[in-house]
Amino acid sequence: MRVTTWNINSVRARLHLLGDWLDDRRPDVLCLQELKCRDEDFPAAVFEERGYNLAVFGQKSYNGVAIASLHPIDAVVRGLPVDDGEARGLAATTGGLRVVNVYVVNGREVGHEQYHRKLAWLGALRDWLDADATPGDDLVLCGDFNIAPADADVHDPELWRDRVLCSEPERARFRELLDWGLTDAWRHLHPDASGRYAHTWWDYRGRGFQRGLGLRIDHHLVTAPVLARTRGVTIDREARKAARPSDHAPVHLDLDP
Amino acid sequence: MRVTTWNINSVRARLHLLGDWLDDRRPDVLCLQELKCRDEDFPAAVFEERGYNLAVFGQKSYNGVAIASLHPIDAVVRGLPVDDGEARGLAATTGGLRVVNVYVVNGREVGHEQYHRKLAWLGALRDWLDADATPGDDLVLCGDFNIAPADADVHDPELWRDRVLCSEPERARFRELLDWGLTDAWRHLHPDASGRYAHTWWDYRGRGFQRGLGLRIDHHLVTAPVLARTRGVTIDREARKAARPSDHAPVHLDLDP
DNA sequence: GACTGCTGCG
DNA sequence: CGCAGCAGTC
């Protein structure tokens, strides 16, 4: 059972590689962020031809999240944790899991109005978990959190110190999610890892990927029952090496059975 | 000896097919129109790697003409027939031929200011020939004339009657070029041809190529000494079938020896 | 640097 | 429909 998260940075601009990628990685459940298209413009065929069911929560130009699953999809919730006109949160039950897919507000820069909105959004997400789930559920909260949880997740912690994606208030909000009853699956399995193989996002500018200038900001946060089934978490760097890639790598969570 | 004309509709947007196309068609002389780039942005490497010499007369965004030749290039003239800031005319001597490459003003619609400019431009081209060449020269005037010379060059003459590209004043200017001492090489060899295999341009809109809704507006006008050497003229429809093609097909003039 | 939408052009 | 360029986002 594979649950993959991928900030695809425009699902339509990635069609040249999506079909082959699906055929090769074959996730049971795929959580996409930054669709950058409305529901009616989502390229459903590439998924449906491969047997995927879909829950799409799109938006013109920005944001947009989707869950594709080889299993039936039920109990879809759109617009979590707040319904503010931005398509950033989508939950669904599929393959025996409660899957919560988020594209967290970027925040722009520390102190910016968007930064405060980011902190509030993360607080609302914690509240939503309190209201709509329990830590005993088979639940995976995954997506692009736009937070590198610790210095080990950053190529140059001094350079990034107190900057957006790395600031202490953001990290505190992230820890509050964990405190609810979740574990950062990749970090759990790789407690001492750092460096380029520990990153999931690299800026397009300045050939950041080739130079290893990345951050780990895409995560699977799992409840204890899911952690007990976790066999591995893999950062799919090959997808970042493709022609015209997303700036994010997919991350695969593999569970048994 | 092959002299090819091709309105490439952005030379940079056609790089995905240009290299293979050059390797396969191997024109001695290639006249390009609608480069849509400045001289410094022209992708010279794809030509130079294949042994071509270049004369480039570019312009930002619109227009732009170039001559690429496997033979040495001499006596380059840029900005013919008028130097009005638009890069539409380029002449060079190469492979024993005087090659005049033009991208004639489109004209927008009959009666428009641009239409009158088109007629004046064609008159100036005739004057330029008078001043700078003689009908006894080994001369090829080729390019995108934005004129279908006769009804046989139009998929639906009644639909196009008196519209820009087909209007009588434009056709009269075209005949004045022939009267100087030139022959429409393709028409000379195919006096009765019409229909989709006689067209060189198809509108992107409405899938015009697939539906055979085209016009013959790209021509080789040759002097008598060149006509005597003309073995064939071929409309390269295969290039129009490629992925992300130009809206124009290349046209090959093959001379002996 | 690579997306989006937008306008101008043919 | 598919180029160009531009402004806005990350």
Image: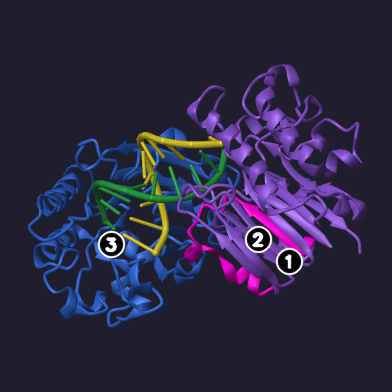
Chain colours: A blue, B purple, C yellow, D green
Which residue lies at the image location 35% right of the left edge and 78% below the top edge? A212
**Residue contact between numbered discs 2 and 1, judged by CB atoms under 8 Å:** yes
Indicate which label's residue lies in the foreground, 3 or 1. 1
Label 1 packing within 10 angstroms: few (<14), some (14-19), many (20+)? many
Q: Which residue is mark 2?
A: B67
Q: Quadrant of residue B170?
A: top right
Which chain's residue wears label 2?
B
The tag earlier along the polypeptide, 2 or 1, is: 2
Q: Give the left or right position of residue A75, taking residue B165 as reference.
A: left
Which chain's residue wears label 3?
A
Q: Give the left or right position of residue A205, taking residue A170 as reference.
A: right
Identify the magenta region. Answer: B25-50
Q: Quadrant of residue A202?
A: bottom left
**Horizontal and vertical percent for residue B182?**
80, 44
Which residue lies at the image location 75% right of the left edge and 33% below the top edge? B175
User: Please, what secondary structure does the residue beneath circle 2 have?
Assistant: strand
The amino acid sitting under disc 2 is: Ile
Residue A72 in view in this figure: no
> Which is more toward the observer, A230 or B17?
B17
Indicate which label's residue lies in the foreground, 2 or 1. 1
**Horizontal and vertical percent for residue B244?**
62, 48
Q: Is A257 placed above or below A60 here?
A: below
**Horizontal and vertical percent for residue B61?**
46, 49
Q: Which residue is mark 3?
A: A224
Label 3 packing within 10 angstroms: few (<14), some (14-19), many (20+)? some
Residue B94 circle label: 1
Indicate which label's residue lies in the foreground, 2 or 3. 2
**How far is the residue under mark 2 from the one under mark 3?**
69 Å
